[in-house]
């Protein structure tokens, strides 16, 4: 089964052998969350934790959440078009959420960037994607899996994943804590590296 994104088949090199013994360019996957969704949620989760009346610069979002500049520009434009953020011009301009964080859920963000959430093309396009839809014994399984996933993502708001300090600062803090915490010796007093 190939990776399906909204009825299209997306290939990836060297994942399995084809029926003819060569390498197939397709891999089996129900859903592939791409960088656009990841970066969009990074940006939105940072904005969600800031003061509602404060515009955050594109540069600050880029640095705090480690998002490549060329990705961020396109993503913020899409999010603005989807009604998630408001942009402000000028030297003190930037971005702020257009709606309250608790009113924005992950499913809506995903669909703003990728279109309708669909685990398999046949669930949305029916016979256009697969001529066996009317007699398929597994389609109800994938339909239920899609319903569960959609409801789960719809139940998670930006408020729940808001991140005030940003990923880079959080990672730096976590690394400092890790280095400052001494390794715990086993009860026997023997280091696992020296045990035989």
Image: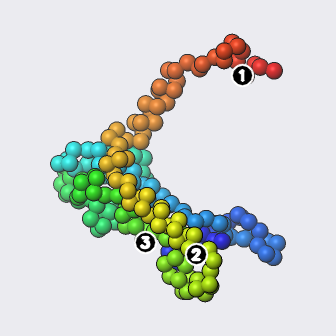
3 vs 2, front mark = 2
Q: Quadrant of residue 30?
A: bottom right
Looking at the rendered structure, the secondary structure element under dot 3 is: loop
Q: Are marks 3 and 1 in contact (CB under 8 Å)?
A: no
Q: Is residue 48 left or right of residue 167?
A: left
Q: Is residue 54 above or below residue 99?
A: above
Give how far across and how far down residue 58 sits, in percent.
31, 52
Q: Is residue 37 left or right of residue 51?
A: right
Q: Quadrant of residue 122?
A: bottom right
Q: Which mark is first along the chain, 1 or 2?
A: 2
Of the pair 21 and 189, the residue shown nearer to us: 189
Give the residue drawn at x 56%, y 70%: 142
Give how far across and how far down residue 105 sits, in percent.
35, 58
The colour scheme used here is rainbow
Q: Which mark is first along the chain, 1 or 3?
A: 3
Looking at the rendered structure, the secondary structure element under dot 1 is: loop
Q: Is residue 2 above or below residue 32?
A: below
Give how far across and how far down residue 143 sits, in percent.
52, 71
Q: Is residue 48 above or below residue 17?
A: above
Give the labeled residue for mark 3.
116
Looking at the rendered structure, the secondary structure element under dot 2 is: helix
Q: Quadrant of residue 169?
A: top left
Give the labeled residue for mark 1.
192
Decide if residue 146 is in sight here: yes
Give the residue drawn at x 74%, y 66%: 16
Residue 139 is marked as 2
Q: Is residue 18 left or right of residue 2?
A: right
Give the residue drawn at x 50%, y 74%: 6
Q: Which mark is first along the chain, 2 or 3?
A: 3
């Amino acid at each position: 089964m190939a990776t399906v994104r909204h009825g299209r088949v997306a290939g990836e090199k060297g994942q399995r052998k084809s029926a003819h013994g060569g390498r197939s360019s397709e891999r089996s996957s129900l859903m592939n969350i791409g960088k656009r969704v990841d970066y969009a949620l990074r940006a939105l989760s940072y904005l969600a934790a800031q003061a509602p009346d404060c515009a955050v610069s594109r540069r600050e979002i880029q640095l705090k959440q480690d998002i490549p500049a060329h990705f961020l520009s396109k993503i913020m434009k899409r999010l603005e078009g989807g009604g998630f953020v408001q942009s402000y011009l000028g030297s003190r301009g930037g971005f702020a959420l257009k709606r309250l964080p608790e009113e924005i859920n992950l499913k809506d963000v995903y669909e703003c960037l990728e279109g309708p959430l669909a685990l398999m093309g046949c669930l949305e396009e029916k016979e256009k994607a697969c001529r066996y839809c009317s007699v398929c014994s597994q389609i109800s399984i994938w339909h239920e899996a899609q319903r569960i996933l959609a409801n789960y993502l719809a139940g998670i708001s930006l408020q729940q994943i808001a991140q005030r300090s940003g990923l880079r600062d959080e990672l730096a803090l976590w690394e400092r804590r890790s280095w400052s915490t001494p390794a715990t010796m086993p009860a026997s007093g023997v280091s696992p590296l020296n045990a035989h």
